[in-house]
Amino acid sequence: MDAAKERVTVLFLSFVSSNWRKFLIPIIIFAALLFFLFFPREQSNSANIVMSDQNPFPELIEEPKLEEIVVDDAPNLIIVDVKGAVLHPGVYTMQEGDRLVDAISAAGGYLPNADSRMLNHAMKLADEFVIYVPLEGEEVPESTLNVVSEPSSTPSTASEGSVNINTSDEAGLMTIPGIGPSKAAAIIAYREEHGLFSATTDLMKVSGIGQKTFDKLESFIKIK
């Protein structure tokens, strides 16, 4: 019995040793099929998932540029001089578009004995504007009242309230919108050196007064 088993074993080993190449090739092919059918598919799917979250050409994507929008909200400032029967007379910085009533409020309001009947509280302010508030019963030159009480867009009123640049003193000249202390002094200095103005356009010969300034002053001045 043992001899028979030994013989069968010898025959099997002999068969395998002589035919191992025939069995090896199918086994390799079968193993390769199993490898490509199962293991690579999972890897490929996971690789695709990872790559889907990445941009293959990051250098081609340009980040949007944020444009800076600068908004200039700063209002234009003007300086006005409030005189007379107010609580705090003085020079005040206002905003372009403010009205005469705003300047009066900035100066603390009227004194109890102020006479504001001739003042136009809705009048728009201009740079270097002079506002004079008289007391009750005080006699004030008509030109002073008209300049601060009537809008310049009315030709007849502007003519009635115009200031004589040949006869007015420094205070009178300063009632003209746009004429401050320095320009008033320059006008008087010009008169003393060259004599009276023969035409309103001669005002442009005064230092600091050009064509644009004259255009703003023309409706408020006269020479006779």
Image (cartoon, rainbow, N blue to C red):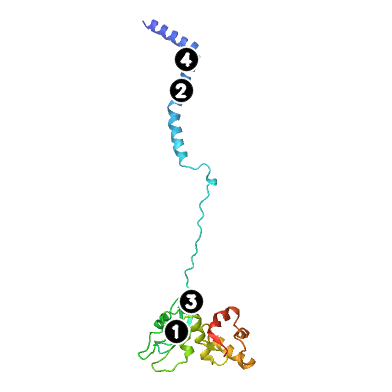
Q: Residues within 10 Å of mark 1 (few under 14, many from 20)?
A: many
Q: CA distance from mark 3 to mark 1?
A: 21 Å
Which amino acid does the dot numbered 4 rest on? Phe
**Quadrant in the picture for residue 87:** bottom left
Q: Residue at x 46, y 18 (%)?
A: 27
Q: Is residue 37 visible?
A: yes
Q: CA distance from mark 2 to mark 3?
A: 88 Å
Question: In the rendering, which numbered label is found on residue 34?
Answer: none
| Quadrant that contains the C terminus | bottom right
Q: CA distance from mark 4 to mark 3?
A: 103 Å
Q: Residues within 10 Å of mark 3 (few under 14, many from 20)?
A: few
Which residue position is annotated with label 1? 149
Looking at this view, is 48 or 141 the one in front? 141
Question: In the rendering, which numbered label is found on residue 33?
Answer: 2
Q: Residue at x 48, y 85 (%)?
A: 147
Contact (Cβ within 8 Å) of mark 2 with mark 1: no
Which residue position is annotated with label 4? 23
Looking at this view, is 103 or 202 the one in front? 202
Q: CA distance from mark 1 to mark 4?
A: 120 Å
The mark that comes first in sequence, 1 or 4, is 4
Which residue position is annotated with label 3? 77
Q: Is residue 128 visible?
A: no
The mark that comes first in sequence, 4 or 2, is 4
Q: Residues within 10 Å of mark 2 (few under 14, many from 20)?
A: few
**Quadrant in the picture for residue 85:** bottom left
SS at mark 4 in the image? helix
Q: Residue at x 39, y 7 (%)?
A: 5
Which amino acid does the dot numbered 3 rest on? Leu
212 sits to left or right of 105: right
Examine the rendered structure and indicate whether residue 216 appears above or below residue 193. Answer: above
Question: For the residues carrying marks 3 and 1, which lies nearer the camera in this image?
Answer: 1
Q: Residues within 10 Å of mark 4 (few under 14, many from 20)?
A: few
